[in-house]
Amino acid sequence: MKIAFFTDTYDPQVNGVVTSIKIFRKELEKLGHKVYIICPDGRGKKEKNVIRLPSFKFKPYPEYRGGVPVPGLLAKIKKINPDVIHVQSPASIGFTGMLIAKSLGIPLVMTYHTLLEEYFKYFLLSLRGKKKIEKFSEKLMKKYTGFFYNRANVVIAPSTEVETLLRSCGVTSRIEVIPTGIDFSPKKLKRKPLVVYAGRLGKEKNVDLILKAFSIVERETQAELMVIGEGPERKNLENLAESLGLKNVTFTGYLERNALREIFSAASVFVCASTTETQGLSVLEALSCGCPVVVPGALGLKDFVTHGTNGLFFKPGSRTDLARKIISLLTDSALRRKLSKGAAQTGKSFRASKCAKRLEAVYLSLVEPLVSVVIPAFNEEKYIEKTLRSVVGQNYTRTEIIVVDNGSTDRTSEIAKKYARVVRERKRGISIARNTGFRHSRGDIVLFLDADTRLERNFISSVVERFKNKDVIGVCGYIETTGKRTNRILYLLCSELAWISSKLGFPLFYGMCMAWRREVFSELGGFDESLKTAEDIDLTMKARKLGKCVLAREAKALTSPRRVEGMGFYPAVKFHIKNFFKHLIYKKPERFYEVIR
């Protein structure tokens, strides 16, 4: 799959959004996908599959650059032909990505990384310097959030709190909560009395509160404070530290990720005072290195920080409470060890590879149809587990499995529950059971499968590939069997007959493994429940008037020979021929097929 990330921030900028993009790109490429990045130009190194657009300096945030979409970008995206466009920011480049996705009809995913209201407020105050603008900016940004993110097929929220915030802004699009995940692992280093902040040095991060709190901490402990990061507030913060008379504070600027890992593994406390974090990636990275955290119980941080388990919450805005929480961790070794253990455990739950697979599933839900596999079953304990395993083991994973227990008295349901959703239908009949399964299904494609029919690993992907032709409304698999040579020849002839009949426009499909477009099956009214046999032929003969019905020779399935063995070879042949013509001419097919029904 090809994915195009549109972002207004990327290398050489260093922030949570850039880190998120890099981590997801790395993990998605490990999964075999190709990721393209469309971003502002800058002094970043040249990278394959990164398209840089002209940009200008953005005064309120000097490290950011405003991207300028250029003629020819649409043509480049057409040439790439991405399966999904993923917008990572709501500014000029992100907005352009949204427009391109809409114009080309490409599925659109958006991630809400940044609390827009807060950042826009600081931007306006930097221009006008009047706090009465705050209410205006909040109202404006809520409206823009609703407008922009409602353009997406799916919105990714990094935390449940952000999902709630988006809903309060009027976002009605599908929202999936997927954190970025981390690729940090701790180093075994001795903890020292070190307090760390790592992140952007901007007003919205409240780093000044950390410095004021540390003036209390410094009086009561021998701890050091390390402030890691860059931003427009660095000079002001250095001046504040000097005016507070702080002696044990170091401003490091940006550090490489390996250096961060060492510092987080050696620190006793990681502190964050921001109430605008949609996730707080640096907080999560510190936790993954076993470093307890002190944070405000606000927004995205509450999704993975638990007070007393892996960190401590302080009262937002209170330097005294913040200082007391830091001091308690520095001086209480038992508490620190307990929270350190909890922190490391939390980090394991947010591995980047796991989060990337969840994001991949979102992409697949937009580009690949859901296939519902409906299996009617009556006393099938001997066969059904192998059949279900063959479905679960498919190389096509967007499936749901529904087993319709048609009154079994053996272990059929018990076995099926390990692999599928089980629906009970007490009224006997193969057509009744199949139609019941359809009503409980959600798939765009519905595959009807007999309980003793095992699929080769590429069966469903081959069927889905055939449905990419919009004229195709039904697909049948190629059936083989085991056992005696005569049995194998009979099933071979049945499959070849089904293939030839489909080529002639007169499809004669069998119900052991046939798939239909949902809307077509619904329009046909499902299987005729008055028929005990030939319900599959009846359906395909009706369906041929609505579109193409094809047999996919590459979609192979192996079914049990019991249909033939239960009747004997020649009686079985005679039965099927007689049954077909009776249905075709008189609409009254042969007697009930007792062997498997």
Image: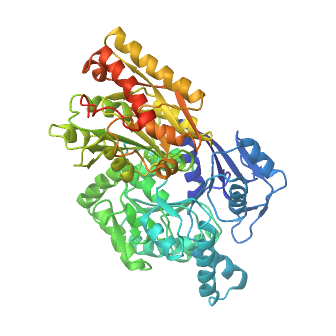
| Image quadrant in which the C terminus is located | top left
Instruction: Please state if 310 lies on the left or on the right of 127 as rendered.
Output: left
The image's colouring method is: rainbow
| Image quadrant in which the N terminus is located | top right
Task: Looking at this view, name the residue that lies furthest to the front.
Answer: 586
Q: Which one is nearer the viewer's eye here, 79 or 130?
A: 79
Q: Which one is nearer the viewer's eye here, 347 or 30?
A: 30
Instruction: Please state if 110 lies on the left or on the right of 167 as rendered.
Output: right
Position in image of residue 505 (x %, y %): 59, 32
Task: Looking at this view, name the residue that lies furthest to the left.
Answer: 409
Q: Which one is nearer the viewer's eye here, 506 or 259?
A: 506
Q: Residue sitting at 56 percent across and 29 percent down? A: 502
Position in image of residue 485 (x %, y %): 36, 9
Position in image of residue 3 (x %, y %): 62, 46
In the rendered view, tell whether residue 301 sits above or below residue 596: below
Instruction: Please state if 343 lies on the left or on the right of 474 as rendered.
Output: left
Q: Residue sitting at 53 percent across and 47 percent down? A: 257
In the rendered view, tell whether residue 44 sits above or below residue 388: below
Q: Which one is nearer the viewer's eye here, 280 or 303?
A: 303
Task: Looking at this view, name the residue that lies furthest to the right.
Answer: 71
In the rendered view, tell whether residue 421 sits above or below residue 294: above
Which quarter of the picture shows residue 204?
A: bottom right
Tell me if residue 554 can be seen: no
Position in image of residue 552 (x %, y %): 53, 28
Count numbered badges in the picture. 0
